[in-house]
Amino acid sequence: MPELMQPAAGHSPADGKVHVAVLGLGRMGAAIANKLAGFGFEVTRWNRNGSLNSDSKARLAAALQGAS
């Protein structure tokens, strides 16, 4: 994980993973969620209409698989 993305001292969760929420999964939000997942962050996604398009689902699944 890049140094700039490390949690501040004393703010690391007990499980050692940094949890991040991405609200809005349009083109930019999906790219951000995918990049964060690829860096090993635990990502919670939310989209206004409750759905993801198939391209976003495929990219996020690939990023999550690569983070494992």
Image (tube, grey):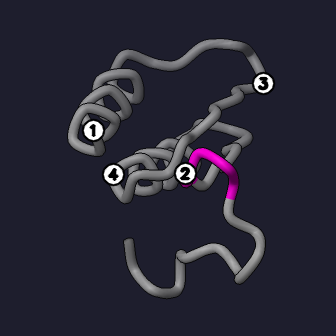
The amino acid type of the residue labelled 4 equals: Gly
Tag 1 near tag 4, CB within 8 Å = no
Label 3 or label 1, whichever lies nearer to me, is: 1
How many C-alpha atoms fall within 10 Å of the one at disc 3: few (<14), some, or many (≥20)? few
- Residue 17 circle label: 2
| Alpha carbon distance from label 2 to label 3 | 26 Å
| Alpha carbon distance from label 1 to label 2 | 12 Å
The amino acid type of the residue labelled 2 equals: Lys
The reply to whether the magenta stretch includes residue 14 is yes
Closer to the camera in the image, 67 or 24: 67
- Residue 48 circle label: 3
The amino acid type of the residue labelled 3 equals: Arg
36 over 26 or under it: above or below:
below
How many C-alpha atoms fall within 10 Å of the one at disc 4: few (<14), some, or many (≥20)? many
The amino acid type of the residue labelled 1 equals: Ser
- The residue to which callout 1 is attached is 68
Say which label, 4 or 3, has the lower sequence index.
4
Image quarter of the C terminus: top left
How many C-alpha atoms fall within 10 Å of the one at disc 2: few (<14), some, or many (≥20)? few
Say which label, 1 or 4, has the lower sequence index.
4
SS for dot 4? helix
Residue drawn 70% across the image and 13% down it: 50
SS for dot 2? loop
Q: Position of residue 27 (x, y in %)?
A: 49, 45
| Alpha carbon distance from label 4 to label 3 | 23 Å
The reply to whether the magenta stretch includes residue 2 is no
Image position of 34 (left or right of 58): right
Tag 2 near tag 3, CB within 8 Å = no
- The residue to which callout 4 is attached is 38
Label 1 or label 4, whichever lies nearer to me, is: 1
